[in-house]
Amino acid sequence: MANLAGSQALFLPLSASRLRSGRNPGGAAADGRKRGLDMAEAAVIAQKGPYQVDVKQGQKYFWCACGRSAKQPFCDGTHKGTGLAPKIFVADQDKSVWLCGCKQTGSQPFCDGTHNKL
């Protein structure tokens, strides 16, 4: 048997009863239902439309991906504990951009019109 002293991770075998319960080691039930805080919570729709924002070249921005921030469309740290995190981007030039407000876009952080289907 290998020496585990100083090991960073310890892997324990799953008990047969845990396997029969339908629960997997990641915390989700076999049918996909959420269990505990092991899975990320769903993003909240902050608004059903984009936010027009003037960005400055070279500046770093933290777009709120959870929808809970009081400083939309930017992150205020409210996502903590949700399993979600802000999308960080740097403006490539001074310009006006449309940042997603519904948090469902496929091109984060920018609006792709998904809010029209909600």
Image (tube, grey):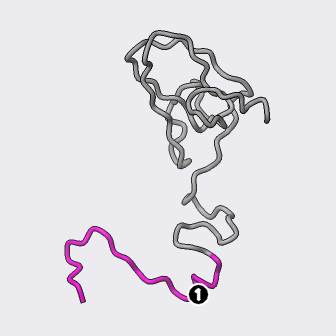
For the record, the magenta segment spans 1-22
In the figure, residue 38 lies in which quadrant? bottom right
Graded by Cα atoms within 10 Å as few (under 14), some (14 to 19) or many (20 or more), the crowding at tag 1 reads: few
**Residue at coordinates 50% horizontally, 41% vertically from top-left?**
85
Residue 62 shown left or right of residue 98 in the figure: left
- Callout 1 secondary element: helix
Image quarter (top left, top right, bottom left or bottom right) of the C terminus: top right
Vertical order, 65 against 94 (above or below): below
Please state which of residues 108 and 22 is positioned toward the viewer in this rendering.
Answer: 108
Residue drawn at the location 65% of the way across and 72% of the way down: 30
Task: Give amino acid for label 1.
Answer: Ser
Identify the residue at horizontal 49%, vertical 82% (top origin): 14
Q: Position of residue 100 (x, y in %)?
A: 63, 27
Residue 97 x/y as whole percent: 57, 16
Where is residue 81? Give x, y as percent: 52, 48
Q: Report the front residue among 48 and 57.
A: 57
Give yes or no for residue 3 being in the magenta stretch: yes
Q: Report the residue at 32% width, 70% height from top.
A: 9
Residue at the disc numbered 1: 17
The picture places residue 90, in percent across and down from the top left corner, at 42, 23
Q: How many marks?
A: 1
Figure quadrant of the N terminus = bottom left
